[in-house]
Image (cartoon, rainbow, N blue to C red):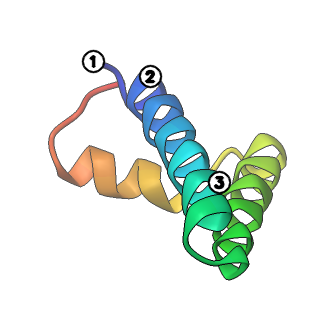
Amino acid sequence: MTVEAALRAIAGFFVMLSVALGVFVHPYWFYFTAFVGLNLFQSAFSGWCPMMTILRKAGLQG
């Protein structure tokens, strides 16, 4: 799996998880959804995402 594919999978998982937690546990979880979205937005312009650094250190190539 490439870094980009793993990043998309993790971001999608975090969004779905935080929406579910926001609906079923507490609405403050929607702040985490917003954080993930803002991070994806800034990475579209900067080309850098903190999770990509983590994934590369974990050994993923791409």
Q: Where does the image place residue 59, in percent across and percent down from the top left?
A: 15, 40
Mark 2: amino acid:
Ala
- The residue at the point 77 percent across, 64 percent down is 34
- The residue at the point 44 percent across, 41 percent down is 10
Eyeballing the image, is 46 above or below 4?
A: below
The residue to which callout 1 is attached is 1
Crowding at dot 2, Cα within 10 Å, few <14 / some 14-19 / many 20+, comes out as few
Mark positioned earlier in the residue sequence (2 or 3)? 2
Q: State yes or no: discs 1 and 2 in contact (Cβ < 8 Å).
A: yes
Q: Where does the image place residue 50, in percent across and percent down from the top left?
A: 50, 62
Mark 1: amino acid:
Met
Q: Rounded to the nearest whole Å, what is the CA distance between mark 2 and mark 3?
A: 21 Å
Crowding at dot 3, Cα within 10 Å, few <14 / some 14-19 / many 20+, comes out as many
Q: Rounded to the nearest whole Å, what is the CA distance between mark 1 and mark 2?
A: 6 Å
The residue to which callout 3 is attached is 19
Q: Where does the image place residue 15, in percent across and percent down from the top left?
A: 61, 48
Tell which tag, 3 or 1, sits nearer the viewer: 3
Q: Which mark is residue 5?
A: 2
What quarter of the picture does the N terminus occupy?
A: top left
Q: Secondary structure at mark 3?
A: helix
Q: Rounded to the nearest whole Å, what is the CA distance between mark 3 and mark 1?
A: 26 Å
Mark 3: amino acid:
Val
Q: Secondary structure at mark 2?
A: helix
The part of the image, by quadrant, that contains residue 24 is bottom right
Q: Which of 22 and 13 lies nearest the eye of the viewer?
A: 22
Mark positioned earlier in the residue sequence (3 or 1)? 1
- The residue at the point 28 percent across, 45 percent down is 56
**Looking at the image, which residue sits at the far top?**
1
